[in-house]
Image (tube, coloured by chain):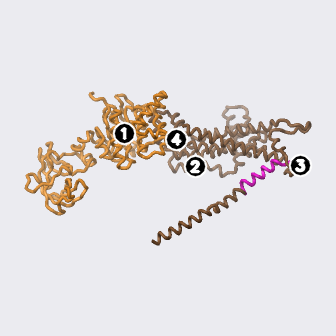
Amino acid sequence: MADIHMSAAEAAQIKTSARHGWLLSLPALVVLAAAAVGPLLIVVVYSFLEAGKHGNVVGNFSTDGWRGILWTKDIFTDSYVLADAHLTIFWRSIKLSFLTTMTTFVVGFPTAWFIATRPPKARALWLFLITIPFWTNLLIRTYAINEVIRAEGLLNLALMKVGVISEPLKLIYTDIAVFVGMTYVYLPLMVLPLFAAIDRFDLRLLEAGYDLYASRWQVLRRIVLPIVKPGIIAGSILVFVPSLGAYVTPRVLGGGKQMMIGNLIELQFLAGKNWPLGAALSMTLLVVVTIALLFYVRAANGEKSHG
Amino acid sequence: MTAKNAIEARNVVKAFGQGDTAVRALDDVSVEIRQGEFFTLLGPSGCGKTTLLRLIAGFEMPTDGLILLDGQDITYLPPNKRPVNTVFQSYALFPHLTVAQNISFGLEMMGKPRAEIAARTEKMLALVKLEAMAGRKTSQLSGGQQQRVALARALAPQPKVLLLDEPLSALDLKLRQAMQIELKRLQQETGITFVFVTHDQEEALTMSDRIGVMSNGKLQQVGTAKEIYTTPKNRFVASFIGETNFLAAKADGTKARLASGDVVDLAVPVSGDVTLTVRPEQVRLASANEPGALPATITNLVYFGTDTHVHLALSDGTEVTARVQSPATGDAGLEKGAKAAIRFAPGAVQVVGD
């Protein structure tokens, strides 16, 4: 009897605490407001202000920042002309991010498959090796790539030694260099979610597929890929989003000439002293990424229900 | 060459590992499975029955020997080129596909025309009574329903042979018994050769046309349920299928003298030191003055509902179990420690090898 009485009292207590449960999430809400919503609002506000002469902003409303994304003011005629340099940079960012995502998937999928199908002990070792690059600063890793692909770098020396080429390949400070660097840097971000998905994959389904007359390719396309799709989506997002906003890699390997959106934004805040344009560009990047994600996830889910 | 063989294994050896540590999962197994029969491979876990099934399916290649399908050598043919389908122990249903998509998968991979795939899928859904579930994901089904999807998926491409790897082991008793009848019905309706793997002797006895009993990578005996139960070839077969009594004896023609000094009749004449086996239900309680009755003492009584197991000791202490039908009152009128006499039913005493 005593037990039943106790649990009734406890139940009442639980009910009361459920009513005030939202209080528990208050700290999280505060952090979210302070860390995410607040700064974002500041960026939005800055994008609608006038640029100060020496950076920063002055408190007058202006759409120059937003207009500056696509048009530049010609200082001689005072008319607006299309900012084709910006368009080139946008296009390069999207193109390189897309290529990086594709390549990390093509390279990362067999890697993740290999790791997920090892015995548990070996698997832990391989995963450990995959995460090792994270221990080193991004800048240092990027300079390491620089060392490999620059004109007098290891790659060119090796190729010339073997006699494949007679003159050093011009790789550094090209789109290719940026692409190679980003692929290297973001590869683990593709491998890890793919590994998690493949690890959950029931390998017996492969036999079921072969048993039902599917070829290896059909098993991969009709069984494996649809089932590990959540991992593919997660990996693609983890690679595509930071690729689009990449800053260090294009800076070091693109040599300041092969700029991406991240570098353009930096330019506006520092050398360009045009904070509203920088803020507007940042917002544009955010919107583009959000839209891309929505499309991607929807397309992926739509295909799933279609089968 | 009278009845055609659907599957034939010839001197099949399958070794796992290398050199001294190699384990022979199959040790020179030869078996002929006839067209249209329900053949069961029965044995304890690790006896090699699943390995043999996987060789027939093509998931593994034998170390030595041949596998023939309809007289054609298919030993090294990959699984997707064999007209053989499998019902997996874990079902291995495709979780991203609906019930209907699972069933039509094999037909699609074979490149059948759309109309045929649709018609055949419908037919299969009806066969396993899952028409109402066609659009569901397999994770939304119960264990028994998943089992039926696995069956329909494997039967849809109309294989020459259907392999079933302990497909009922995950189901509870009631469902398992229902599925046993269901499987038998499907086999008779489709006329497809079924090769069924199980460790459950009751399953094997009730469903099979013929049973192959396996242990230690070897096929111990092949025969109908009746043959295997009434005339087991060796000690393993006798003890694995049903319960039995073993008695050491010295035989001379159709008479055999037990260690207790009692003499029993044999069905088949032999001579020398032999092991005899007699099923508990073939042991009868007799009156002491009946000719041929063996004196014994009741050591224990175990009530099983329909039957009562009477444990007895012969004059030298040899243990014999008799299975008698329980009377209406449930009380056999027997007492522990009481003197009794037993007789073996005519023809029930069999000689078994080791």
Crowding around mark 2 (Cα neighbors within 10 Å: few <14, some 14 to 19, many 20+) is some
Q: Nearer the viewer, mark 2 or mark 4?
A: 4
* Image quadrant in which you'd find residue B22: top left
- Pick whichever, A125 or B203, lies toward us: B203
User: The numbered mark 1 sits on a residue in which chain?
Assistant: B
Dot 2 and dot 4 residues touching (CB under 8 Å):
no
* Image quadrant in which you'd find residue B153: top left
Above or below, comparing residue B302 to residue B182 in the picture? below
**Residue B256 x, y percent position in the rendering:** 13, 48
Separation of residues labelled 1 and 2 (CA atoms): 36 Å
- Pick whichever, B353 or A104, lies toward us: A104
What kind of element bears circle 1? helix
Crowding around mark 4 (Cα neighbors within 10 Å: few <14, some 14 to 19, many 20+) is many
Which amino acid is tagged 4?
A: His
Q: Nearer the viewer, mark 1 or mark 2?
A: 1
Q: Which residue is mark 2?
A: A127
Which amino acid is tagged 1?
A: Leu
Q: Which residue is mark 3?
A: A53
Separation of residues labelled 4 and 3 (CA atoms): 59 Å
User: The numbered mark 2 sits on a residue in which chain?
Assistant: A
From this viewpoint, which residue is outermost toward the right?
A76
Q: Which residue is mark 4?
A: B96
Q: Which residue is mark 1?
A: B52
Which amino acid is tagged 2?
A: Leu
